[in-house]
Amino acid sequence: MFKCSLYFSLLFLMFTLWIVLHSNQSSIPTSLTYYPIDEKNQITESSTSILLKDNIQTPSIEWSVTSSSNIPVYLRQDVGLLYKNGRLKGIMSKWKENERDISQMSAFDHHQDALYESLSFHYGERHTDSKSINSFHTLTHDQAFVYSINQKYQSFKEPKNQTEKHIQTLVRQDALERLNREWKNLIHHFNINQDEYWAVPLIELTKQEHEYFNTFSEETKTKVIGQLFEGLYKHYIIPFSQDTDHTTSYMPLILISKQLDELLVLFTNVNQEPEMLIQQIHQ
């Protein structure tokens, strides 16, 4: 009887330990830190994908984020943000130690015409024998317009005919009207002179040809985006990762000073309060 009790006690202890270890591996790190750029290493492959899966019963959206670095590094992490008609739909975050590859996927039912947009931040952190720490990162993006014709859902990335062009205009216009109201209220709340800034929706960060970011040198632009996501991760991604109702949040707006010395990030936080992050830019 004593041996049997001891056996089950040990089994329970091992099971409890497995749960603790498993929870620690899947938990989200409390910070994502920008370090001086690693010139020798990089994210070699990265993608963000939004696909419509037209199941017989209920159509679903499959959202995936993947990346690889050229070598295993101390910390690899991918963070993905998904927006539906300008509102936060989901967050994915995964990290690994001493690995190259990360892959994440999430699926959910779809019920209405919508514009899905996703932005992902792929990050690597390398520690050297000399105790120095460097980091590297890249961004990826995807979008999908999903609509119903004759009770059958279809999707496209970019319009290929007049029907799709019409749907793109209607869906995007509806999303932009809501976002512009939200952003206008935030700008008014913080008493910002909009004439002194260029406005960039968060989702447009991946457009490398974006004229405002191209005013910076490549080194400064990389640093600005790395520090931007360091702040977003702490003040936006972590709080909303712990919130069960993402739909209360609209996409953040980035304001870049025309003097090129400051960047602002405006959003409504998890407590439904206006929040502004301020990032000084040193070129």
Image (spheres, rainbow, N blue to C red):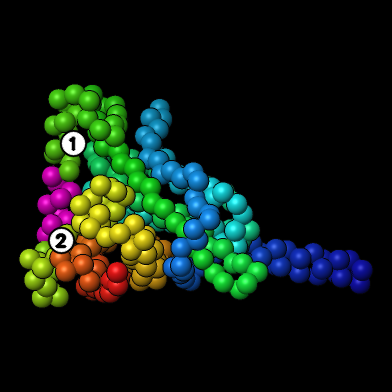
Q: Position of residue 190 (x, y in %)?
A: 14, 75
Would residue 175 be counted in the magenta stretch? yes
Which residue range is magenta in the image? 173-181
Determine crowd level at label 1: few under 14, some 14-19, many 20+ residues with C-alpha closer than 10 A.
many
Q: Position of residue 142 (x, y in %)?
A: 34, 42
Would residue 156 be counted in the magenta stretch? no
Report which residue position mark 1 lands on.
Answer: 168
Residue for point 25% across, 33% down? 158
Residue for point 66% across, 65% down? 21
Query: Looking at the rendered structure, which numbered label has been put on residue 47?
Result: none
Q: Main secondary structure of the magenta part?
A: helix
Per the image, label 1 sits on a secondary structure element best described as: helix
Disc 1 to disc 2, how far (Cα)? 25 Å
Q: Quadrant of the N terminus?
A: bottom right
Return the residue nearer the eye: 19 or 158.
158
Per the image, label 2 sits on a secondary structure element best described as: strand
Count up the numbered dots: 2
Report which residue position mark 2 lands on.
Answer: 198
275 horizontally vs 43: left or right: left
Residue for point 56% across, 49% down? 70
Closest to the camera, between mark 1 and mark 2, is: 2
| Residue 107 visible somewhere in the drawing | no
Tell me: residue 112, above or below residue 129. Answer: above
Q: Position of residue 78 (x, y in %)?
A: 47, 55
- The answer to whether mark 1 and mark 2 are in CB contact below 8 A is no
Residue for point 10% across, 75% down? 191
